[in-house]
Image (cartoon, grey):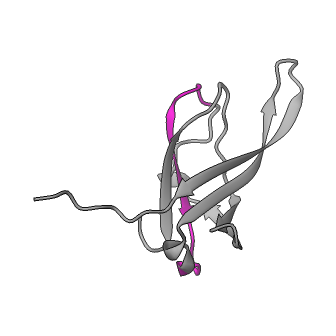
Amino acid sequence: MTRDTVTIEFETPFQGFLLPDGEVNLWLDGKTWRVVSVVTDQSTPPGPHAAGLVVRLTLRLDGHPEWAQAARLEVRWLAQESGSSGKRLGRQFVLNVTNAAPTSSPR
């Protein structure tokens, strides 16, 4: 993580999960909304992915240094997925992230 990027690692919730590319919505403490970019070369490829796989999503927050002071980050995007009937379904995904500074290990 740098001042201008944040990387989130999480387990995919279901079979066929797709990560976003392009832009996503970022809410800071539920009060401030920003549109930020996915850093594809530092993120896991979009997928589809198996359920339970740990993936990485890196976001570029250029010009939005206020994200570092937020206690809670909420990442939202709309994705298309294939349903069991083969029909394309739109689904909004929301990741709730606690933004905590890394702690140093005791000596």
State the residue at coordinates (88%, 18%): 85
Q: Tell me if 28 is positioned left or right of 69 in this view.
A: right
Q: Quadrant of the N terminus?
A: bottom left
Q: Quadrant of the C terminus?
A: bottom left
Q: Residue furthest left?
A: 107
Q: Residue furthest top?
A: 85
Q: Vertically, is 28 above or below 96? A: below
State the residue at coordinates (73%, 52%): 77
Q: Nearer the viewer, residue 70 or 41?
A: 70
Q: Is residue 57 magenta?
A: yes
Q: Percent from the top left, x then y, of residue 98?
A: 51, 58
State the residue at coordinates (63%, 50%): 95
Q: Tell me if 87 is positioned left or right of 80 in this view.
A: right
Number of marks in the image? 0
Q: Percent from the top left, x then y, of residue 87?
A: 89, 26
Q: Which quarter of the picture shows residue 82?
A: top right
Q: Tell me if 104 is positioned left or right of 86 in this view.
A: left
Q: Percent from the top left, x then y, of residue 17?
A: 66, 33
Q: Vertically, is 20 above or below 34? A: above
For the record, the magenta segment spans 49-65
Q: Is residue 7 magenta?
A: no
State the residue at coordinates (58%, 25%): 50
